[in-house]
Amino acid sequence: MADPSVQPGKRRREEEEEKEKEEESVLAPGPGGDKEPVGNGTAASSHFPFSGFRLQKVLRESSRDKIIFLHGKVNETSGDGEGDDAVVILEKTPFQVDQVAPLLLGSPELQLQFSNDIYSTYNLFPPRLLSDIKTTVVYPATEKHLKKYLRQDLYLVRETGDDYKNITLPYLDSQSLSIQLPLSELGWGVLTVGAKSMKKQRRGKKRYLSKWVYNILEKKAEADRIVFENPDPSDGFVLIPDLKWNQKQLDDLYLIAICHRRGIKSLRELTGEHLPLLRNILQEGQEAIQRHYQVKEDHLRVYLHYQPSYYHLHVHFTALGFEAPGSGVERAHLLADVIENLERDPHHYQQRTLTFALRADEPLLKLFQEAKKS
């Protein structure tokens, strides 16, 4: 039964937050002062890459997902507004059962809020071990970042096969919104603090989103995080935990399969030729997850996004009971269904009308609206 407290359309808007959170490159100082890929986290103490933070606006918040997006001024000398812009995203982390149980032993710090017969409600103040908040920083933030994180209305788009050829694909090519999208278009200076993780992008040089994908595939980064690999260059892939999953509990299990073959942008470009690759990802990915995490295939949701967040073919594996961002019907396509559709018609996804959501300020939406008028 749907939650009556969730306003119509709210879940869809919140799912779009996946686009801002999905993939981040990991770079650190290397020889010669350049940046080289490193692992994904550090247990060492860290600090923000700026001084001060004067709140300007709450860009977006979700009580359902326990997350808030803040715009602030930093590096100000006298509060005159001449500082830099930054976006800070605060997100509460999931509970860890093995740490929560001891919390209720002894005499935890409590404040009574309500009591009636056998029912009572308290505010409980946990120790530091259980009070960490995942904190993502975008600094320096541009006007484009501020618009990106600002809550906006969403619109459903129905894209035919011809629409993809005549509207979407030319737009993607003209904007370089492929695997080689410049990171400057996505947001430089991303720093995540909390849950013992830190990720920072280099600012200044133009680097491309392909870099982090190829670093994983070529074992230049995150090699220690790879759960499984089929090394076949055509029909193989790597399976790796998604950065949104802290791997401390299985309730929100989330892994990504990234194919070795380059040049497949999205679901739209899949044909019968790709069936061996897709079958490998489904079967071998499920088997690997069962071996490593003891989660069986009937407890997994395995799907592709359309539109995807980046244009190199990848598949999502999430716990079935986890309402992962982007798992709604307007964006997620179950891999088993994709395989069956291609078995029946090798060109199914070149011809089928696909539905997806776009934010109000996205240029692609305006192109569809203009095409509809003409």
Image (cartoon, rainbow, N blue to C red):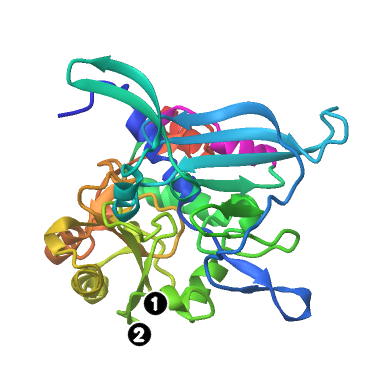
- Distance from Cα at disc 2 to Cα at disc 1: 8 Å
Tell me what residue is drawn at x 21 percent, y 21 percent.
119
Give the SS element for disc 2: loop
Q: Position of residue 313 (x, y in %)?
A: 38, 65
The reply to whether discs 2 and 1 touch (Cβ–Cβ < 8 Å) is yes
Q: Position of residue 301 (x, y in %)?
A: 21, 55
Give the SS element for disc 1: loop
Bin the neighbour count of mark 2 within 10 Å (Cα to Cα): few under 14, some 14-19, many 20 and up.
few
- Residue 286 is one of the magenta-drawn residues: no
Outermost residue, bottom direction? 232
The disc at residue 260 is 1
Q: Position of residue 139 (x, y in %)?
A: 69, 47
Earlier-in-chain disc, 2 versus 1: 2
Query: Which one is nearer the viewer's eye here, 165 or 316?
Result: 316
Query: Which one is nearer the viewer's eye here, 366 or 358?
Result: 358
Vertical side of 57 occupied by 65: above or below: below
The three-letter code of the residue at mark 1 reads His
- Residue 151 is one of the magenta-drawn residues: yes
Vertical side of 61 occupied by 96: above or below: below
Q: Left or right: where does residue 173 sit relative to residue 16?
A: right
The three-letter code of the residue at mark 2 reads Pro
Label 2, on which residue?
Answer: 231
Q: Position of residue 249 (x, y in %)?
A: 31, 56
The quadrant in which the C terminus is found is top left
Query: Which one is nearer the viewer's eye here, 81 or 150?
Result: 81
Vertical side of 349 occupied by 369: above or below: above
Quadrant of the image occupied by residue 88 = top right
Quadrant of the image occupied by residue 143 = top right
Query: Is residue 63 among the parts visible in the rendering?
Result: yes
The magenta segment: 142-155
